[in-house]
DNA sequence: ATGAAAGCGCTAACAG
DNA sequence: CTGTTAGCGCTTTCAT
């Protein structure tokens, strides 16, 4: 591997000058800069980020750690797309990104990252105080994704879970639905609570009552949702719509309804959450709540980079809004339809 | 950040001894080892992988690069699961993984990895000679995933694309299907050809003729597949089964059949490829070809690690077998059913 | 604008 | 088994 001295020799300058040519080009005369560039190319030189990091104390790498119980970590309807956007943005900034779910690591999870000297870490989903302080204690900036810690210097970027559910309830109400069922995936407690709270608040705000027999908590897997919803729909009374806290659950709900001989959305409506690829795969295509994973990733990067540069993010937590995307799985009731036409036309 | 000298001071030994305590514990007396461990803990020391890498020329990091036209890179029905398994295995070995789709990088894609001094690289999907030699030329081992280069020292791990399709055709034949349609996703030419060749060979082997009007090439997106298949199914004659080269395409095919008022699998069968999450989301659940992404990842890691350790992988290319997983989207024809019963009972 | 020298934290001979 | 010494490839004062 060619080093800076090889370039220096070929260009006939000192290695300091070569170094400057790469780190502060304007501090070098145009003429020598040109010679150095050419020399570098001729010996096929690439700066050694490792050696550079020794001096600057900046590796140009960050870590992205997904809580280990969130398996799969990468093929995950929520965290996968966020990771995708983080990777893309960071690569553009010249950063490398280490990924790891913290499972299978013998020591303190994040130990690996620590020894790799990352400049900052994004901790996705749940985490704990020990992990967070293993970073912050060494001055490594941390941003929490979808989790919050009431501690100074720990920043969070969150999805507006409550708002997402509230919007959905309002939308359903406006569409004429009065009997809204709620099928909750068993996620981390943090998210679970936020979505549930959104449901409670929105139902109250709409003057609707929550029927326990229309509610269920399930593992976020198609089969589990299917079983639970299938049982629910076998009873005498049933909701006119099932609001689900993720798309996987919603797909299970749709399947259960279909199996019961119900038509979706004519007999029963379903709405999902995440706006994942499953939505269009489902028949009928799922109306779902989009969490704007791109923005979530962008914000996380922004908050992390700010800290790495020694500045403070503008607020201790950033919240990203959701957006309901309409497809085919929700029936607009006759009366509501008429009202909509009257209102908007 | 505490360094090795801090530990040395506290433990009352030289820094070399501390170094040994971490890299070759058995070369240190039990007594001092204990003192060093304690000292390290007391000052909260973690070895600096950067400094270590300067000497050893091994960073303990590898790169995983997905060809940029394979977007999304991470949320990808084929490469996502492979990445997942690579990350998991490598983390256990103490390796860090850099990921990047090579899009959005100003320079030579992989330039970033190069400067990060990775110990090896997995290049997924298509790549080109320049990228490969930018690594191999510097002595950095490379393994190609789903791609092949006829060049010394470049190893590949491949999925048995042709075999996967051939198995499917044989399975369909045994199930009594004689009119097999083939809906091909427009992937990289490498994969496209291998699957197509499998189809051609298998049809020939089964004595079946390929009907061009039952074949289509589509973008691997639900809508595109839908349009194409919808048109196909509007014609007078139609195949009894549609063999699709990925699940996304298959879902589009199912939707098109349903829209035409056909029942799946009673009126027309569909089989997918990848055995992704879409299979169970689809109604009916898709019979699909599983590529064994776990094994693909495992093999890639094995081949890379072997090279990093200076050994040669046993062969220049490893091929991983596929497996057909039956679900609900393929009809077993009456006659075939009878035959199966006769044969096996 | 450029060069000389020092040193980042660690490992790897080489002595002892 | 342990300490001494040199140096990895680079950036960064400090001179010039």
Image (cartoon, coloured by chain):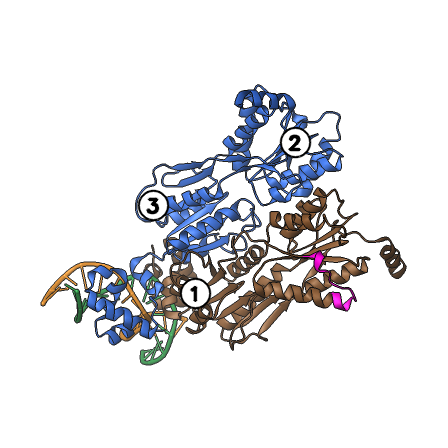
Chain colours: A brown, B blue, C orange, D green
Q: Which quarter of the rendering shows the N terminus of chain B? A: bottom left
Residue at far top of view = B207
Marker disc for residue B306: 3
| Tags 1 and 2 both on a single chain | no
Q: Residue at x 53, y 60 (%)?
A: A92
Tell me the magenta residue range: A203-215
Q: Is residue A239 left or right of residue A311?
A: right
The answer to whether residue A169 is above or below residue B345 is: below
Foreground: disc 2 or disc 3 = 2
Foreground: A146 or B200?
A: A146
Q: Taking B255 as reference, is B75 left or right?
A: left
Image check: B61 left or right of A252? Answer: left
Q: Chain of mark 2?
A: B
Report which residue position mark 1 lands on: A118
The secondary element bearing badge 2 is classed as strand
Kindly tell me whether residue B67 is visible in this rendering. Answer: no
Instruction: Please give the chain letter of the residue carrying mark 3.
Output: B
Rendered image quadrant of residue B245? top right
Q: Which residue position holds label 2?
A: B269
**How would you rate the neighbour count of disc 1 (Cα within 10 Å): few for under 14, some for 14-19, many for 20 or more?**
many
Q: Is residue B7 above or below residue B232?
A: below
Q: Residue at x 61, y 43 (%)?
A: B280
Q: Residues within 10 Å of mark 3 (few under 14, many from 20)?
A: some
Q: Secondary structure at mark 1?
A: loop
| Residue A178, image x, y percentages | 79, 59
User: Is residue B76 rendered magenta in the image?
Assistant: no
Q: CA distance from mark 1 to mark 2?
A: 51 Å
């Amino acid at each position: 591997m060619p080093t800076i001295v090889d370039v220096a020799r070929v260009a006939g300058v000192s290695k300091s000058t070569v170094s400057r040519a790469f780190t502060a080009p304007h501090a070098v005369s145009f003429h020598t800069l040109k010679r150095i560039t050419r020399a570098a190319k001729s010996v096929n030189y690439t700066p050694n980020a490792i050696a550079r990091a020794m001096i600057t104390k900046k590796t140009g790498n960050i870590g992205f750690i997904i809580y280990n119980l969130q398996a799969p970590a990468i093929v995950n309807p929520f965290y996968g797309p966020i990771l995708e956007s983080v990777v893309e943005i960071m690569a553009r900034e010249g950063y490398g990104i280490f990924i790891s779910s913290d499972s299978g690591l013998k020591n303190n999870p994040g130990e690996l990252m620590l020894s790799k000297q990352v400049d900052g870490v994004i901790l996705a989903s749940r985490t704990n105080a020990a992990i967070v302080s293993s970073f912050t204690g060494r001055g490594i900036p941390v941003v929490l994704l979808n989790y919050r810690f009431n501690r100074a210097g720990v920043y969070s970027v969150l999805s507006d879970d409550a708002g997402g559910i509230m919007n959905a309830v309002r939308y359903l109400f406006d569409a004429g639905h009065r009997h809204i069922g709620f099928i909750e995936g068993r996620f981390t407690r943090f998210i679970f609570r936020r979505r549930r709270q959104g449901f409670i608040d929105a139902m109250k705000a709409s003057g609707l009552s929550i029927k326990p027999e229309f509610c269920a908590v399930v593992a976020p897997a198609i089969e589990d949702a299917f079983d639970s919803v299938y049982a629910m729909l076998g009873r005498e009374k049933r909701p006119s719509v099932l609001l689900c806290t993720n798309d996987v659950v919603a797909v299970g709900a749709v399947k259960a309804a279909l199996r019961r001989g119900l038509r979706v959305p004519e007999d029963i409506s379903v709405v999902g959450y995440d706006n994942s690829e499953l939505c269009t795969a489902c028949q009928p295509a799922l109306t779902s709540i989009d969490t704007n994973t791109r923005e979530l990733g962008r914000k996380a990067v922004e908050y992390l980079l700010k800290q790495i540069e020694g500045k403070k993010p503008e607020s201790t937590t950033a919240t990203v809004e959701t957006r309901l995307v309409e497809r085919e799985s929700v029936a607009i009731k006759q009366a509501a339809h008429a009202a909509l036409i009257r209102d908007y036309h």
